Amino acid sequence: MKAYYERDGVTIYHGDCLDVLPQLPDKIHTIVGDPPYCSGGRQQAGARLNLEKSARNTWFLTDNMGTDSFLWWMREIAGRLFNLAELGAHFYCFTDWRQYSNLVTACETKGWTLRNVVVWDKARGGAMGSFWRNNHEWVPVFTKGPARAIAHGSCFNTWHGTKPQADEHATVKPLGLVSYLLQAAGTGSVLDPWMGSGTTLLAAKTLGCRAIGIEIEEQYCEIAAKRLQGEPVMPMTRADDLHVRKQVFQQRWMAPITMMADVDRLLSTVRGEEQTERWNEAIEAGKANVAKRMAELAGQADRVTQCLEILARLNGLKWEVRA
């Protein structure tokens, strides 16, 4: 099996972790994972819609599964991780409140023991319009067999810190949080089966640990390699990766109340003449999808008003409600 990147004790493999994990020869001391949550707006029924040019299959791979598919998929991976782990190994796996029980079921039925849950307090609110705005994520803590002792006594199961503003990956986690988890687990080899932009590998390298990362999307393998080498990383909002934001924008017409926040976020990050053409394409696609959603919501006055507000903002107009 050929490595995509190998330097200074850190190795990256480009591929599906289900295929790569059985080929790893060494036992692993600590596993930190951030699998696709497959939750939130991606409900079980909605995740199976076959929409032309939908972002559901391309936002990032494997984030389009329903509950039953996620449980099966996660259980398969949990079993392979269990086989690779040393006795006493820690497994920290990010999730949210919707998938917590499914994740725990998948892991426990493959031998992992749930020991605790670390809560990441993001210190800021979630999407506007949400029913109880979400500002935290969960990190269930599993061990293989008897729990290996925490490396030092200052570890509490709440970590406070905001989400990184960098756009290397849509769900990037704070370097400080990942370092906190690795320090608790103690020095040893580290594995991240859903590497993303390489935050776990960067934390492991900084702490002097050998590390292996697996990532199914090559663009993130390249970003992670650059981060590890200290090279500047072109953020995803630039022209070469703006198509990802366009896909998210297209998807969000299914939940119009969240689109206002998305528009503000995109407008605040787009810079430079080089992005003008692709940004215009994203705007046109968004306008078309909002118009489609407006037609579907005919007769639902409140939701139509929301869509009209969004459409007005996309056209740079001020929206006013008149009696």
Image (tube, grey):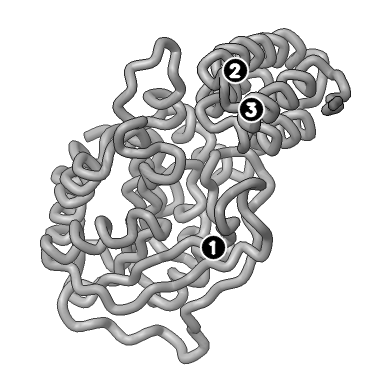
Whole-Å distance between the Cαs marked 3 and 2?
Answer: 10 Å
Q: Where is residue 80 in the image (x, y as percent from the top left)?
A: 15, 52
Q: What residue does disc 2 label?
A: 294
Circles 1, 2 touching at the beta carbon (< 8 Å): no
Please tell me which residue lies in front, 216 or 120.
120
Q: Position of residue 46 (x, y in %)?
A: 36, 30
Question: What residue is shown at x 28% (from left), y 68% (from top)?
Answer: 29
Tell me if 319 is positioned left or right of 42 in this view: right
Q: Is the N terminus in the top left, top right, bottom left or bottom right quadrant?
A: top left
Please tell me which residue lies in front, 6 or 284.
284
Whole-Å distance between the Cαs marked 1 and 2?
Answer: 32 Å
Question: What residue is shown at x 66% (from left), y 13% (from top)?
Answer: 287
Which amino acid type corresponds to the residue marked 2 in the rendered image?
Met
Question: In this orientation, does residue 14 appear?
Answer: no
Is residue 1 placed above or below 207 in the rendered structure?
Answer: above
Judged from the image, the secondary structure of the residue bearing numbered disc 1 is strand
Q: Quadrant of residue 284?
A: top right
